[in-house]
Image (cartoon, grey):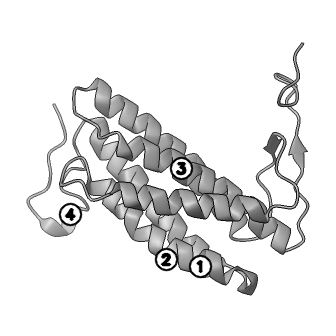
Amino acid sequence: MSIANSRDLDELCYPFIHETSWLCDYELLTDELCAQIGAVLSALPVTCEDIYTDLERLQPLIFHANGSIRGRMALTEQDLVWLKSRLHHYRQQLRVPPRGFVLPRGTAPVPQLHAARSNCKKAIRALVRVSEEGRAVPDILPRFLNLLCNVCFTLTLVINQREGVTEIEFVSSSYGRAGETG
């Protein structure tokens, strides 16, 4: 027997909360992602006014991604073009581009951005499951979330660089350095 929504609206946080579809999980993950970006906005250092401006524009796009399966598609190719341009802008600022993995460290809001990056991956995985359940997933959604994941990672590097935090490279005992074999 499944759990039913309460008839008392005070006892219901989200109308689809008891669904078994991965769509609800996707919506909850993107909701969390939007909240994480809000946390980042509240913790950005003064050296990051440009990042603040970009994240202010980005945060509503995450909510647009949230409702774009159950509701009307709200993301556009222009949104992706803008986000990709910002990714390239911030990558150009890096004095030393990353060679592989780095440990997710730094002062706030770097940990929040790393958590958001991870949440992007979870949302993409939820979209895979939504698609497996037979629901059409517009191609723009996983493209947006993959791009957003890369933006979040790049912003961690930019903020750490601006704040004088040295990245700690992670060398996997399982895989070695990126590009190494054997």
Residue 165: image location, x then y, percent: 88, 66
Q: CA distance from mark 4 to mark 1?
A: 36 Å
Instruction: Kindly identify which residue carries mark 4.
Output: 11
Instruction: Determine the residue positioned at 18% across, 35% down.
Output: 2
Residue 147 in sight in this render: yes
- Furthest-left residue in view? 7
Left/right placement of residue 155 relative to residue 146 reads right
- Indicate which disc residue 52 carries: 1
Q: Count neighbours of disc 2 (C-alpha within 10 A) and say few if under 14, some if 14 to 19, many if 20 or more.
A: some
On residue 147, which mark appears?
3
Q: In the drawing, what numbered circle is on residue 1? A: none
Instruction: Give the foreground label among 2 and 4.
Output: 2
Numbered circle sitting on residue 56: 2
Q: Badges 3 and 1: C-beta atoms under 8 Å apart?
A: no
Measuring from the top left, give residue 57's x and y in whole percent.
Answer: 46, 74
Q: Amino acid at mark 4?
A: Glu
Amino acid under disc 2: Glu
CB-based contact (under 8 Å), mark 1 and mark 2: yes
In-image side of 76 versus 48 (left or right): left
Which comes sooner in the sequence, label 2 or label 4? 4
In the depicted view, which residue is nearer to us: 23 or 73? Answer: 73
Amino acid under disc 3: Leu
Query: Measuring 37% from the left and 54% from the top, which residue is drawn there?
Result: 77
